[in-house]
Image (spheres, rainbow, N blue to C red):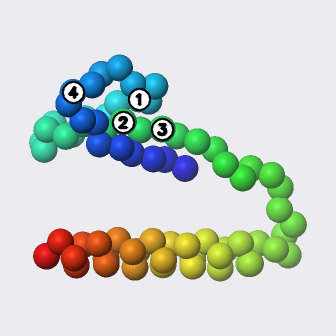
Amino acid sequence: MISFKPQKDGNSESAYSLVSLKSTNQHFNYKVSFIDLDLKYLNKMEFYYELDQKIVKSYIKMVNGVNQTRL
């Protein structure tokens, strides 16, 4: 999992790493984490795939809802 957080007020003292977009003069703290690395039974892979698809669809729906309220 990769998470990004906009860096505010040029604070360079953070526990997270920094990435900068020069074209937009934006700075973000980011963190990379590895989660759920335990082995899964092969017959459960379809279930996990479908669950991941539901999560992605819900996220896209939420993001689109947020973007529409900003218009």
Mark 1: secondary structure: strand
Q: Residues within 10 Å of mark 2 (few under 14, many from 20)?
A: some
In the rendered image, which residue does mark 3 sit on? Answer: 31
In the rendered image, which residue does mark 4 sit on? Answer: 10
Can you say whether 48 is above or below 30 in the image? below
In the rendered image, which residue does mark 2 sit on? Answer: 29
In the displayed structure image, the side of residue 27 where residue 3 appears, left or right: right
Q: What amino acid is found at the position of numbered circle 3 in the picture?
A: Lys
Q: What amino acid is found at the position of numbered circle 1 in the picture?
A: Ser
Residue at point 72%, 52% (across, down): 36
Percent across and percent down for residue 40 are 83, 62
Residue at point 84%, 69% (across, down): 42
Measured Cα–Cα span from mark 2 to mark 4: 11 Å
Which circle marks residue 17 in the picture? Answer: 1
Percent across and percent down for residue 49 are 66, 74
Measured Cα–Cα span from mark 3 to mark 4: 18 Å
Mark 4: secondary structure: loop
Disc 2 vs disc 3: Cβ atoms closer than 8 Å? yes
Disc 1 vs disc 2: Cβ atoms closer than 8 Å? yes
Of the two numbered discs 1 and 4 on the same chain, state the one appearing first in sequence. 4
From the viewer's side, name the closer residue of 14 and 32: 14
Disc 2 vs disc 4: Cβ atoms closer than 8 Å? no
Mark 3: secondary structure: strand
Percent across and percent down for residue 60 are 40, 74
Measured Cα–Cα span from mark 2 to mark 3: 7 Å
Can you say whether 30 is above or below 36 in the image? above
Of the two numbered discs 3 and 4 on the same chain, state the one appearing first in sequence. 4
Q: Residues within 10 Å of mark 3 (few under 14, many from 20)?
A: some
Measured Cα–Cα span from mark 1 to mark 2: 5 Å
Q: How many marks?
A: 4
